[in-house]
């Protein structure tokens, strides 16, 4: 599975909240950067993928991440670059707590497993999470963390 963070306008490591959380949990994602900014990401020791110069907004970036032959894995998870992650509390599932080590990696592994059965999966946002406490929801709006089964989308255009 490709774990990617399309990013724009946040070349400082201190502003890469999603990246910092993933790396702290042992996950090394691919930063996907605009051609005009790629030289500003020299500090990142992980993989950096530079978009073709004609791709400058998020919708074409996501389309490229799904359809380009550059990407070989069956699944892709795209995460916004400014996320802070939390987990449900066991004593009160309407409330959240900070993540402990390896929870973020386990969550991504669970997403990958679900992508074998569903063409699109995501992670619930905190807002509204106090009202929906089920482990899994179907047919809801996904945003910020988008997981796709590439071949399904390619096959069905």
Image (spheres, grey):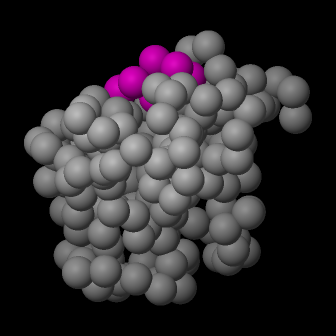
**Residue at position x 62%, y 13% in the image:** 117
Asked if residue 70 lies left or right of residue 22, the reply is: right
Closer to us: 13 or 96:
96
On screen, residue 126 above or below 103: below
Closer to us: 41 or 75:
75
Q: Quadrant of the N terminus?
A: top left
* Snapshot quadrant of residue 90: top left
* Snapshot quadrant of residue 150: top right
- The magenta segment is 109-115
Residue 59 lies, in percent from the top left, at 73, 63
Asked if residue 94 lies left or right of residue 157, the reply is: left
**Residue at position x 24%, y 78% in the image:** 13
Asked if residue 132 lies left or right of residue 101, the reply is: right
Residue 28 seen in this snapshot: no
Whether residue 110 is in magenta: the answer is yes
**Residue at position x 47%, y 86% in the image:** 9
On screen, residue 32 above or below 115: below
Whether residue 131 is in magenta: the answer is no
**Residue at position x 55%, y 53% in the image:** 128
Residue 87 lies, in percent from the top left, at 30, 44
Residue 74 lies, in percent from the top left, at 56, 25
* Snapshot quadrant of residue 83: bottom left
């Amino acid at each position: 599975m490709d774990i990617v963070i399309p990013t724009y306008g946040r070349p400082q490591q201190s502003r890469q909240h999603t990246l910092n959380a993933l790396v702290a949990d042992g996950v090394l994602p691919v930063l996907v950067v605009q051609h005009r900014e790629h030289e500003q990401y020299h500090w990142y020791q992980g993989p950096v993928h530079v978009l073709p110069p004609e791709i400058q907004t998020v919708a074409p970036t996501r389309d490229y991440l799904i359809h380009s032959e550059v990407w070989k894995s069956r699944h892709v998870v795209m995460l916004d670059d400014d996320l802070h992650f939390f987990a449900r509390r066991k004593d009160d599932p309407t409330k959240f707590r900070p993540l402990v080590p390896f929870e973020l990696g386990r969550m991504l592994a669970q997403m990958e497993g679900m992508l074998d059965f569903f063409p699109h999966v995501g992670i619930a946002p905190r807002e509204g999470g106090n009202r929906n406490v089920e482990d899994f929801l179907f047919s809801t709006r996904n945003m910020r963390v988008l997981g796709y089964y590439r071949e399904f989308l390619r096959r069905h255009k």
